Image: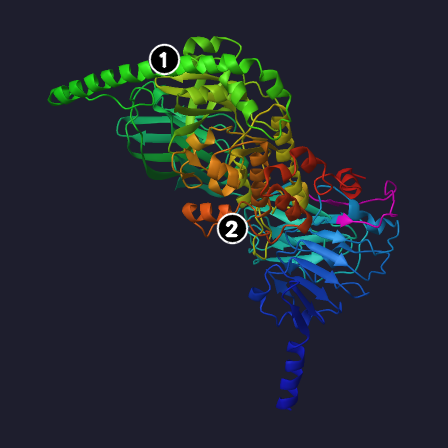
Amino acid sequence: MLIVLLLALLHTAHSCDFDANLSVVSCTDLDAFQLVNDSEIAGYTLLLQQCSPPAEAATSTAIETVELLCDKPLPPFALEHFSNLHNLQLTQCNLTNLQWQQFYVEGQTPHADFTTCPLDCNCRNEWIISTRNNVAFSVVPILPPSYRCSFLHCDWGNLLAPAFIECVPGDNVTLIVNISAATVEDFPERQYFSWLHTPELSHNFTEVISNTSMKLVIEPVAEEHLGTIRVICWHCEHPLMVSVELRVRVPIRARLEERDDSIRMIISGWPISPLNLTIEGDDGNQTHLLSEDDSVEFFDSLVVRPDKWHSLFHRKVFSIFTLACFTCPVDHPAGNYSFEVCSTTNCFRTHNHINHPGNHSHFYPPITNSASLFLPILVFLIFIFLLSMLIFRIRIMHDCCKKISFLRDKASLHHVISRRTSRVTEETLLRLEERSSLSSSDYSGQIIPFIELGTIQVHEKIGKGAFGEVYCGSWEKTGERTVAIKAIEADEDVEKEAAVLSRLEHPNIVRLYGMTRDGPRLLLVFERMNMGDLRSYLRARAPTSASYSQFPPALTENELKVIVRQIVTGLCYLSTQQIVHRDLAARNCLVSGESDLRCFLATQRPPITIKISDFGMSRRLYGQTDYYRMQNHCLLPVRWLPPEAISDHRFSTSSDVWALGVTMWEVFSYGELPFAELNNFEMVSYAMAGMRPPMPKSCPKPIYELMQRCWATDPDQRITPEELLLDPCLTPTLTDFLCAVPV
C-alpha cells in the first residue's frame, strides 16, 4: 500500500513540465502546481490544463501570468493568493458569462484576455468593463473585437450600511449590511468583514450571511476593533463593497518617529478631535489647538504641520520641524522637550530631543571673531584678494573672446535654429550664450522673474544633497505650502539654466516661478509637487508578496504606461523648445495628486500628474550616489547616459531619449536602480561595452522593445520622442477607452 502511495505522489510530482527558455511551467491542475518550488519559477507563465478545484488553496509569489487551457470555468477564488499575478489569458474559452469570483486576485487588478470567449450582453457580464469605484475587484479586460454591449439598462445593485457605529469597549455590537443586488451561490468559508488597516484581526466576532443581508456580531467590542471595516459581498453577482467606521471610544495615545529633518507624531484613538498640544521645554511651555488643515507654530520657530495624506478618522499624523534658520525670529535652542496631547477625554504625554542649528545668519555659518585667529585670517584675506584680482582679469579677457565669438556666430544663428532640434545640442548652448551673467538687478527684467525675499516663507527641509538643499515653502501669490525652494550656490551656469527654465510652460514640466537671493545662495522658487519624486512613488507602490490587501495598492501595467506617456509628452515639449535636459531620470520627475492611502484597488486611485524637473541642475541638488565624476568633467549620472555622453560629454535630445529609455525601465521595475549590482566605475565600462538593462520581470515585451530602440548605439538611429508618443504601446486602445468611460 505504501509503495502505491509513493508511486501516486511521484506521478503527481511529474505532472508539471518546465521550459526554462520560454519561462513556462505547464501543470495538469493547481494541485500539481502546489508541489512546484515557487522560488525557482520567478516571472514564469503558468499553463493550466485542467480547471478542477484544488484540494487546498494554491499560493504563489512568482507566477505573473496564468494561461487557462481548459474549457470549463475556473473554480471561484482559485487564484486568489497568486500575489504577483498580472495577466490572465483564456485560450480555449467557450463561456458566455463570466463570474468575477473565478478571476479574483487579492490586491491586484490583472489584465484579462477574454478575446476567445463568446460573451453575451448579459447584465452578469457588466462587471468586466465597469469602472465604478465601490468595487471589490476589477480587471483590465481585453475583449473580442466584435463585443459591443450597452449595460445602461442593468441594475448594478448596492449595499446599504451605516456610515459609522459608535460604541465603548465591552459593548455588544451588531452591524447589518442589507443587500440590494442579485446574488449567486453562498461562500460560507469566506470572511465577509475585515478591518482595513489590520486585516489579520479575526477574533471576537461572528458573521451571519444570507441573500438579503450580511451581519457582523462583535461580543464584546475591544479597543483593537477601532478602525474602518471593509465589507465585501462575495456572493453578489457584481463585486460590491462598502466600508463602515467602527468608532470605539479609546483613549488617545501618541508616539514619535524620527525622520531626517523632522519628527513624525502619530496620534491614535477616538474621539480624536479637537486636539490640544502642549510643548514644554527648559524655558517654558506653550499650548495650541492643532488644526487639520493649517500649521501651528510654537516658540516662534517650532512648527507642527498636519499630514492629511496619512491621517484617518482614528489616527492623526503631524510633522514637527524647526524653521530654516534664516527665517527664525528668535533662536530656538536644542534640548529635551515633552509633548502632551489632550482630547476631550484624556491626555497623553511623551518626550523627545529636538535639534536646531541655531539662529545663524541665513544659510552660512557665522564668522569667528576670536583675536587669536586675527593674523591667519588677515593673511588668508589678502591671499583671497590677490587671487580674486587675478581671476577677475582672466574673466575679462575670457568675456572679450566670448563676445567676439558670439558676433561671429550670430550671422549663422538662423541656420542653426532651423536644423532638426531633436539631434543637436548646439541650439541649447546658443540659447544659453545669448544671456550674460545675471546680477540681482537683472532679475527685475523679463528674463527671470525676481521674487522679493519677504514674500516667501521657508518651512521644513524636504531634500538635500552635496550641492544644495530643498525646502517646502509658501509664497504670497500661490498660498500656503505651494512652492519648493531650492537653495544652491549661485554661478553663471545656474542663472543661465534658470533663465531657460522660467520660460517653459507645459502640464508635464515643473514650473519655475522665479528666484531671489539670500546672501551667497540663490533661491529658486518652483511649484511644489505634493507626492514627491517618481522613484520614491514607484517604490512605495511596488507589488508585495503579502497575502492581504496592499495600501496603497500596487501600480498596474496600465498606470505605468500612463506615467511613461506623461514623461514622453514632457520630453516632446522640451524637444520643440530646443531644450536638452541632460539628467532625465525617475528621481528628477515629480508627482502630484490626491492621496491613495485609503484606496482598496488600483482602479480607485485618483489620477496623478507627472512633471519633469531639474533641468541640468539636479547634479547640484543630489548626492553622489547616482553620479560619477569622469576625468576633467563634472558629476555625471552614468547609469542614464549613452556612450557618446560618457566618452565625449556630448548631450542632445538623442541622449535624453537614451535616458528616457532608462527612466521607462525604472518605471516598469517600480523604482529599482539600473545595474544595482555594479558600482559607478564598473558601470562606465559596461555602458561603453554596449550593455543594456535587462527586461524587468513585470514589463510587457513591446514596452521593452521600445526601451531598446531608445538605447541604439548610433544616436541618429534612436527613436524620437514624437515617435514614442505615437507608438501603439503608449497610445490608448479602444479597450482602454471603454474602461475609462463609466457605463
The disc placed on residue 580 is none
Q: Is residue 143 above or below residue 564?
A: below
**Residues in magenta?**
141-161
Q: Are marks 2 and 1 in contact (CB under 8 Å)?
A: no
Q: Is residue 734 above or below residue 375?
A: below
The residue tagged 2 is 224
Q: Residue at x 41, y 24 (%)?
A: 487
Task: Residue 448: give x, y in percent of width and height.
Answer: 50, 14
Q: CA distance from mark 2 to mark 1?
A: 73 Å
Answer with left or right where residue 148 lies relative to residue 570: right
The disc placed on residue 396 is 1
Q: Earlier in the sequence, mark 2 or mark 1?
A: 2
Q: Residue at x 40, y 21 (%)?
A: 491
Task: Residue 603: give x, y in percent of width and height.
Answer: 68, 43
Amino acid type for the residue under numbered disc 1: Ile
Query: Is residue 143 on the magenta stretch?
Result: yes
Q: Quadrant of the C terminus?
A: top right
Q: Is residue 247 something one can see in this rendering? A: no
Query: Is residue 539 on the magenta stretch?
Result: no
Nearer the observer, 599 or 144: 144
State the image quarter where residue 218 is shown. bottom right
Q: Quadrant of the N terminus?
A: bottom right
Answer with left or right where residue 658 lies relative to residue 72: left
Nearer the observer, 59 or 19: 19
